[in-house]
Image: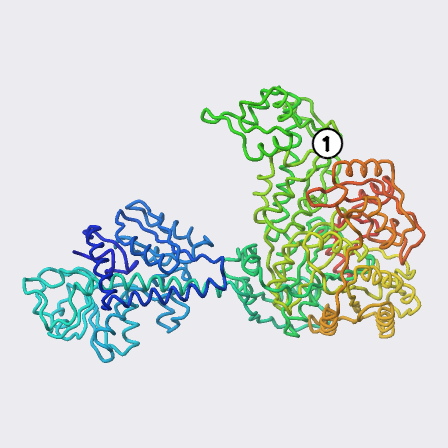
Amino acid sequence: MRFSALCRLSRGAAAPLAGRKGTAPRRGMASAWGRWEKQQAGGALGSAAGEIIQSSKKVLASLQKGHPTFKPTLAIVQASDEDLVQEINQNFAKEIGLHVIHISLPQGSSEDEIVGEILRLNEDPTVHGIALHLSENACSSKILNAVKPEKDVDGVSDVNLGRLVRGDTYNCSVSPTASAVVELLEKLVKTVDGKKVLLVETCGPLEASLQCLLQRKGAMTMSCQWKTQQLQSKLHQADVVVVGSTKRKEIPVSWIRPGTTIVNCYPDFLSGEHGYGQDVKYSTQSAIDAVGPLTIAMRMENMVKTSERWIQSQQYREWNLHCLKLQPLSPVPSDIEISRGQSPKAVDVLAKEIGLLADEIEIYGQTKAKVRLSLLERLKDQTNGKYVLVAGITPTPLGEGKSTVTIGLVQALTAHLNVNSFACLRQPSQGPTFGVKGGAAGGGYAQVIPMEEFNLHLTGDIHAITAANNLLAAAVDARILHESTQSDKALYNRLVPIVNGVREFSSIQLARLKRLGINKTDPGTLTADEINTFVRLDIDPSTITWQRVLDTNDRFLRKITIGQANTEKGFFRQAQFDIAVASEIMAILALTTSLADMKERLGKMVVANDKNGQPVTAEDLGVTGALAVLMKDAIKPTLMQTLEGTPVFVHAGPFANIAHGNSSVLADKIALKLVGEEGFVVTEAGFGADIGMEKFFNIKCRASGLVPSVVVLVATVRALKMHGGGPNVTAGAPLKKEYTEENLQLVADGCCNLQKQIQIAQLFGVPVVVALNVFKTDSHAEVDLVCEIAKQSGAFDAVPCNHWSAGGRGAVELAQAVRKAASQENRFKYLYNLELPIIEKIRIIAQKVYGAKDIELSPAAQSQISRYSKQGFGNLPICMAKTHLSLSHQPERKGVPTGFILPISDVRASIGAGFIYPLVGTHDNYCTRKSQRTSHTTQDRSLLQVQGLKPSPPFCQSFNAN
C-alpha cells in the first residue's frame, strides 16, 4: 500500500499529510493505525508519538488552567475527495484537548478559491491554526504563503522557513514531517552527526526544513531526484536515505549499500523479489507505521505551541517607542511649515511600538490607521492607566490653547520623561477648519501630524455620519409621503412583501409589533386594526426635529423648503441643514461603548412625535441596521502621532454646546489599556471648564464608567486680562497695549475667572493643575502672579508652559506636576443624581457651576420638560446649550458674573446619545447667535497669517467647536 495521505514526504510539502492519486483505501489506513496502537502497547518506535501526545496534553491543560475560556481550534483545509487522515487527526486532537474543524473544498478548486478560504480563516479569531491537505499539484507558493505565519502549524510559509533557518525555532512552526524524520533517525542511528543523508525527491519547504534540521545536528546532506544520472553513486555513498515520493520501478535493491538506514513512506521503493535484507537497518513498513502517526503527533504539538504563542501575544506588551527628534527654530515657523518639516513614522511601525497586533489595525495610507475594538477584549484584564482631562478658563477670542497643551503634555511625558502616554482628541469639522477658528491639530511644536490629514477628511468618519444622518432624514419624509397617499393594504404590502410566495416579518418588524403589544409572528394573522397600527407611524410634520446635515458652513442652507417636485404630490415643508458634527449620531459615536451599544442607541433616536404626542424613533422607521452598517468603520478610533512620534487617537467631534464636546469613550478606553497601569491618557474637553469639563464628568464619565485622575486647567495671561476688564479684541486687528505690556492689576482682576473654574473642578473632587500658556509678551511678574493666585485658590500646582515654542521639553514641568497630582487621593463624584427631576438638575448646574441666582423657564421649555418626563426620559443627564464666552448666558459679561437669572428658552432631547439639552437664553437671542455664525475663506485666513495674527472667533460665534 501507499501511505501518502498519512505520512508521505511530499513534493513541495504543501502539508505533510497531502493526498495524491493512487492513495490506499481507508482499510489500509486503519491497518496502519492498528499497527501503531500495538506498537504503543509494546513500546516500539511508534511510542514516540504517544509521548508527544501526552506531553502536549499536559502543556495545553496548564494553558487552559490559566485561561479557562480558551478553546484552541485547528482548521484543516482539504481540496480533494480523499479523507484518509481525518480519523487520526481527530483522535489525536481529542486526546490532547484540541478542537478540529474540517473544511472540505470541491476537488479541482482553483488556486484563488483555496487562497480565499485560507484568508477567511486567517481573519477568523476563533481559529488558531491552519493545516492544508491538498493534492501535489495544488501546492503552489501562493497558496502556501497565504497561510498567516502565526497560524501555519505545518511550517510551510516562507516566513516560518526563514525563522527556522535563522535559528528562531521558538517563534516558528517546523515541518511536522521533517521533525518526525529527524526523531526517527535519532532513535535508529542514535546520532546523525557525521552521517551522509541523501534526500530523494524531497522538494520545497520539506527539503529546506530537513536540510536545516539535519545540518544543525552535524549531518551532511545531499539532494537529488529519481532521474538524476548519479543516483546509484549517491545511494552507495549515503548512510541514510530519506525518500520523498514513489520511485522509478527500474531501480534495483542492489543500489542500496548494506547497512543503510532508510526512512521511506512507499513500499515500492525497492524493486524485485529480493525483499528487505538483514543489512537494511530499517524496513519500509516500519517507517510507514512510525512516520505517519509521529507526523500527526508533531503537527498537534505544533498546534499546542501555536496556542501558547497566541496566548502570549494577547497579553499586554511593553512599549518600545522610538520618539522623533525635534529641533525647534526661533522665531517659530508657521504651523504648516513645522508639520511638513517633520517626517512621521509609518503608522504600522508606531502601532507595533505601542503593543498593537498586526490584525488590530486597518491602515489608511502611511500615517493613519483604524484600531479595531477587539483590542478591548484582548486587554480586558489589563489595569487602566491614569486619566487626565484638559479643560480651560472661559474662552476669549485670544485663545487659550487647550489642544496645544494636550499635545505638549503627552510629548513631555513620553518623549522626555519616558512615561507611556496617549492623547485623545476630537476630529475637527470642516466648518470651523475653513472658517475663522481653523484646524484643531495643536500648534507650534506641539501638533498632531500630518496636519492636513488630521484636519481634512481623516478616515471619513464625519462623512459616514453625514450619510447615516441624511438617510434617516430621507426615511422620515418618505414615510410621511407614503402614509398620506396609500391605503393600509398597500403600505402593508410594501413593508412586508411576498418573496418567493412567502410573507415574513423581519426581526426589526417583530420588535415593533412587540412594542405595539401585538404578539403575532405570522403576517397573515394580523387584523385590519392591527395592520393599521403597524403600518402607520402618523408622524406630525410640525414636530420633526431631525434635520439634514452637511459638514460645511453654508448659510443659504440654514432654512430651505423641501418637497417641491411634482413627484412629492404637494407634500412640502420648511426644513434646514445643520453642520454634520451637530448630528446626534456624532454624539452617539462619542458616547458608545460597543457596536451593539451603538446600534441600540441609534434605534432610540427620536425624530419626531406622532399625532398623539408619542415619540417616533429610528427603530420605528426600520432603519437602525442600515445606520449601523454605515457607521461600522467610523466606530473605530484613528491612530496618528505627534511631532515627537508619540501616539494620538482622533475620534468623534461633537460640539460642546448642543452636545457634550468630548472625544470618544472608545478611544479613551483603548488608550487606557495600551498605556499600562503607570501610563497616562490625556483628553480634552471643549470650551471652558464650566461647559466641556462639566459635561465630561456628568455625561461622558457616566457613559464610560471611567474615573478621571487629574484636571489640567489651561489659562493665558492675555485671556485673564480680558476677563479682568481689558478692551475688546477684534480678529485680525493688532492687540492693544493692555495685552502686550505688563499690567499686574488687570491680571489680578481677571484671575477671578480662573479661581471660579478651579472651584468648579473641585465640585467633582478631582485635583487641578493649572497650565499657563506663556507668550513672549508676558512678563515674569505676570506669570508668577497667576501661578501664585492659582495655588492659593486650591490648585494642586500651577506651571508655566513653553511647549508651543519648545515642544515636549517646554512642558516637562507640567508633566511632572500632573504625575504628582495623579498620585493624590481621588474623591471623584457626580454633581447631581440622575433621579432628580429635570428642572432640579438644570438648577443645580446653573447655580453651582455658572453662579446663577436661579433659572427661568419659558412656557415652551416647561411644556417640553413635562412631555419628556411623561415619555420616560426624565432620568437622563443634562447637556446645557449655552454660550461659551461667559459663565452667564450673556457673552459680553466676562470674569465671574453673579446674581443673574438663567433663562431657558426651550428644552430638547438626544435620546439615543442619552441626554436632555436645554437651550439657554431667550428664543430670539438663541436664534440670533445661531444666525451670526460666520466663516472666513481660506484666502481671508491666509491674509491673517501673513500679517502674523492668529484668526479667532468673534464673541457671538457660539456654535463653532473650540
- Residue 246 position, x and y percent, is 17, 59
Q: Residue at x 89, y 54 (%)?
A: 851
| Protein image colouring | rainbow
Residue 705 image-quadrant placement: bottom right
Residue 66 position (above or below residue 816): above
Q: Residue at x 88, y 69 (%)?
A: 741
Residue 919 position (above or below residue 122): above
Q: Classify mark 1: residues with Cα within 10 Å, few (<14), some (14-19) or many (20+).
A: some
- Residue 680 position, x and y percent, is 66, 66
Q: Is residue 322 left or right of residue 14?
A: right
Q: Is residue 63 left or right of residue 114?
A: right
Image quarter of the C terminus: bottom right
Tell which of 664 and 331 is nearer to you.
664
Query: In the structure shown, which secondary structural element does the residue marked by tag 1 occupy?
Result: loop
Residue linked to disc 1? 614
Residue 894 image-quadrant placement: bottom right
Residue most extreme to the left:
273
Amino acid type, mark 1: Gln
Query: Quick check: can you spot residue 200?
Result: no
Query: Quick check: can you spot residue 360?
Result: yes
Residue 401 position (above or below residue 468): below
Tell which of 953 and 68 is nearer to you.
68
